[in-house]
Amino acid sequence: MLPLLFAMLCLGSICAPVAHAEENAGDSTSEQSSGVSIAIDSMTPVITNDSGLAMTLTVTNNTDSAVDQGSIDALTNFSYTFVSRSDVQDWADGSARIPLPDLLVTLHVPRIEARASVTVSSTLPASEEILKQLNSWGPRPLALSYAADDGSQSAQLNSFITRSQDGLQGERTPQLHMTMMMPLTASAWSINNDTLKAMRAQNSAETKASSIAKLSDTTVSALRDKDKLAKQFSQLQTVADPQILSALQTPHVSALMQPADFDINMYSYVNNDGTYTKAGVQKTSWAASTATQTLRDVLKDEKASRPTYALQGSGPWNVQALNTARAQGYDTVIATHDFDNQDDDTAHTCIYSVPTDSGDVTVMSAHTLLSKLVQGTSTSSNAQAETNTAGRLQRFIAQTAFYQMEQPYEDRALLVNFGTSTSASDIYTYMEALGQASWLDLTDLQTLRSHQAYVSGDEATQVANEAGNNFDVSQYNTIALSSTLSTLTSSRQSIERFNSAVLLAGTTSSQSTDSKDSLGATQWSERWLQAHDDLALLALNANSPPGTDIAADTTSMADYLRAGVSLTTPANVNVVSESASLPVTVTNNLPYAIKLRISSRTDSMEIVTSRFVDVDVPANSETQATLKIRVSTSGTTTANQMLVNNEGVPLSGTHTTTITSQLQISDKSGLIFIAIAVLLGIVGLWRQFNRKKDPDE
């Protein structure tokens, strides 16, 4: 009735400001994309009894000509009540026509040069009479209406202002419970070359396989900034990847997610445990118990504990994925997207209890629209005010107030997910504003989980099945995932072959270190596999698209291990007899003895070398070996040598030696030729002296 009443009043002259507002209350999209556009740089998100109203706006001239000075009217309707969520969205999109009789303030806008911007600000103290007229709580429409004095340009931006219950009379309805979740994880992992070098050169147990991966200084700094927010805002719930805890030094963790933010959902869709095992990803590596143990190792407290929740990966939580998570020790999972669509219904508690073969699983589903806003995405392409953080904050605050007013006496609990890429500064902005939102009760994750499930049993199973059915697996890069798994499998097999077929098991290191701090050959080789598997787990991080550099790093790691053994051969060998030797040197830069073979082939049938020579090389030393050369003619050929294990698998690149043969008479074959020549000469002379002469001679 109130909107209708104001529409009727606008027919009279007492509502002159409304006429101005309605002239500009059409499609804000077209107006924003025209000559002049407006953006909210900052604005008081929650108006309290003593907050006042401050705003800073940027006005941009998108034309090639200067725009005359003008003004911006900040218009609202103190009495308007949004009646539906579509009503709220239509206003944000600029498609609703709402009368705006209340002028909050007018901001002067100076002349704007072509393709330039100006910034204007205004502050209304709490004592201003106009703000006292905002005497009921809730969200209100706000229009920022610009007009140049010469009438050449105009624009409008639709947003919201929200009055809290602070200082107002009347009964307060129960608060809407809300949990703000901040995942702490990273995807920009790379191999730690310092650790890699130490692993190959040393036998010290101080070099841990777990330090094989590292994050950039920029990433670590960003994670620490977020971690500080968790200390500053007790209501902010941090769900941390155990792999990043050591980088935070003193982590403030509300809960843990699966190690390395492993993509459990795609694992369940692939449904081939053997493929992951061959790649080096064991089930235990991403189990809930492993997450807890990592926390204890970092905090050096064997009694330390946090709730563990499985965070959603690429696909939705269908029943199969939920069963996989439950079998791994996660009785609660967090659905960050695509589980249910709360935008199609009134806001409701985001808890579901889904039965699986491994037991019931509690699903805490993040609210889609609210999570989209805090993660930096507009609710629609037409919501022009939501293109930056300040504008999205105004919408977020108004939307939560609307949800509370929508069903004020229902006990409801919502989950909002900040996501992994939201900056610490943006999170701070939201948390600071939420401290003034009197209609919200910010709770922790455990309190959220304790709420009665919105649906359970067969009905919850149906929700999970629908989520799975709506997932188009073709949109996920399964080819890249398959390639990543193949790369990881190949690199792991390469390390396994080196350990089993090259390294001399049971040997001791050549380094003289404290026995308590040194590794045997078997332990040393197992450390390489563990380091590989740590990288493999990170390569399947839910936030890293398959095929990222970390998977390729495992191949580099295997190559670097093999490069610890090298072969040196001469470039040229000259042979002047039917047999000779080709000297080669094998160098072992590893702290343990090795066994291997030298393989050699020539491209000639007349000049050949030994096919294989077995060599044992002590730790950190070199050994010379000899390849026999056999020749039967003069000529030139190329010998190709490489290091291989006892199975013939190459360990090094191919080395070439040019063999040149020049047979001399000192060879046995030469002596034979001479003896035959002498014999023939003697026979010839004998015949010459003993033949009968012809009578005519």
Image (tube, rainbow, N blue to C red):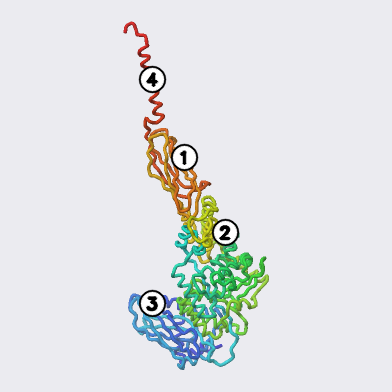
- Say which residue label 4 marks: 680
Q: Quadrant of residue 42?
A: bottom left
Q: Which mark is residue 610?
A: 1
In the displayed image of the protein, which residue is found farthest to the top? Answer: 695
Pick the front one: 636 or 173? 636
Under circle 3, the secondary element is loop
Query: Which amino acid, mark 2?
Result: Tyr
Badge 2 crowding class, 10 Å Cα cut-off, few under 14, some 14 to 19, many 20 or more, is: many
Determine contact: label 1, label 4, CB under 8 Å: no
Q: Is residue 475 visible?
A: no
Under circle 4, the secondary element is helix
**Quarter of the image with the N terminus in it:** bottom right
Badge 3 or badge 2: first in the primary sequence: 3
Query: Which amino acid, mark 3?
Result: Gly
Of circles 3 and 2, the one toward us is 2
Badge 4 or badge 2: first in the primary sequence: 2
Q: Quadrant of residue 582?
A: top left
Residues under labels 4 and 2: Cα distance?
78 Å
Determine contact: label 1, label 3, CB under 8 Å: no
Badge 1 or badge 4: first in the primary sequence: 1
Query: Which amino acid, mark 4?
Result: Leu
Query: Which amino acid, mark 1?
Result: Ser
Determine contact: label 4, label 2, CB under 8 Å: no
Determine contact: label 4, label 3, CB under 8 Å: no
- Say which residue label 3 marks: 35
